Image (spheres, helix red, strand yellow):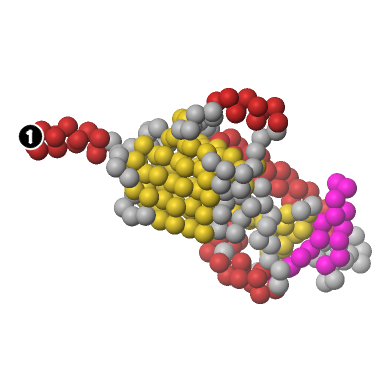
Amino acid sequence: MIKLLFILLIPFVLHASKILSYNIYDRTDRVDVMITFDAPYNGVIKQSVSASNIIIKLEGATIEASKSKELSSKFLNSLVITPMDGYTQMVASVPPSVVLKASKTSDSYGLRLRFTNEAPAKENSANEQTTASSLSSLPTKQGDELSSSYYIVVGILIIGIVVLFLLNKRIAQNKEKPNYKSWLFKENKEAFSAAGENVTIRFQKNINEQNSVVMLDFAEQSYLVVMGTNNVLLDKFTDNKPVTQDDFETILQNRRKELTEFIEEKEPLQIYKEKAAGIMYEA
C-alpha cells in the first residue's frame, strides 16, 4: 500500500518547481519580489487579501526552509515564506492601499510579485467584484516584457551613438579653428545647453592621449561615456549616481576590463548587444 501511494505521488514531486532564490527590490513607486525556480513554474497562484496582509499560495512550488524579511517600505512591511504540504505560502504585510500584481518571465523560470498602490477608482470597483471571495485565483501573464525592454534599450543606445557622433564631429570642427579651446572638457565643468536641456560634466578622467571617460548629467540621469577614438555610452545612472571623485574612481576600477576592450576597438555592435542584454534585467 505504501509503495502504491509513493508511485502515485511521484508525478507531483517531479513536476514541482523548487524556489532557488528570492530578491526584493524597493523602488520609489513599488516593491518587486523576484523569485527564481530550478524548473519552469506552471503552477496555480492564489491570493487572499485582508486589511493588513496579502497571502499568496504558490501551488506546485517548494522551498527548503522558511524565510522572512523585514522592510521599511511604504508598500511592503514584511514578507514570510513558508513551505507547506504541496505548495509554498507567502504572507506579505502591507498597507491597506497596496495591491499585488504577478507576472512570469517568458521561460517561466522566474516570477515577479509587484506590490504597488491601488488602481484608480474605476478599476477598483470592477476588481472588488472579482475579489469578493476569501480565496481567489491570481492570474499571471506570460509577458514579452523582456523582449520589448531589449528593443527599448537598443533604441536608447543607438540614440546615444548618434549624440556622441555629433559631439565628436563638433569637437573636430572646433579643433580646426584658431585658438581652439574645448567646450566639452572645461576644467570648471560648467553646464552647456543641448536640445533645450542642461548637460553638466560631473567627472572626467583621461585614459590615454586619445580617450577620456566622462560622467555627464542630462535631465534626471547621469551617463558614463567614453570620448575619443571610440565614442561609447557605457552606462546610465538614475538613483545611484556617483557623488564623489572616489565613487567615480570606483566605477572606473570595476570597469577596467570593459574600458580596455573599448579602447582596443572591440566591435561596437557586439558591445551594444552585450550591454543591452545586461541592462535589460535591471529593475
Q: Nearer the viewer, residue 131 or 283?
A: 131
Q: Is residue 272 left or right of residue 81?
A: right
Observer able to see residue 207: yes
Outermost residue on the right side: it is 178
Residue beneath the point at 53% across and 64% down: 257
Observer able to see residue 261: no
Outermost residue on the bottom side: it is 246
Q: Is residue 152 left or right of residue 141?
A: right
Q: Where does the image place residue 243, in percent across and percent down from the top left?
A: 71, 69
Which range is magenta? 189-205
**Number of residue marks:** 1
Q: Secondary structure at mark 1?
A: loop
| Location of residue 239 by image quarter | bottom right
Q: Where does the image place residue 23, in percent across and percent down from the top left?
A: 48, 53
Q: Nearer the viewer, residue 82 or 268?
A: 82
- The stretch drawn in magenta includes residue 203: yes
Placement of 104 over or under 182, stated as above or below: above
Residue beneath the point at 22% across and 33% down: 11
Residue beneath the point at 88% across and 48% down: 196
Placement of 183 over or under 61, stated as above or below: below
| Location of residue 101 by image quarter | top right
- Split into 4 quadrants, where in the image is the N terminus? top left
Residue beneath the point at 48% across and 37% down: 48
What secondary structure prevails in the magenta region?
A: strand
Q: Which residue is mark 1?
A: 1
Q: Is residue 82 left or right of residue 268?
A: left
Q: Where does the image place residue 190, in percent across and percent down from the top left?
A: 86, 65
- The stretch drawn in magenta includes residue 269: no
User: Which three-letter amino acid code belongs to the residue tagged 1?
Assistant: Met
Binning the other alpha carbons within 10 Å of mark 1 as few (below 14), some (14 to 19) or many (20 upward) gives few
Q: Where does the image place residue 232, in percent across and percent down from the top left?
A: 66, 54
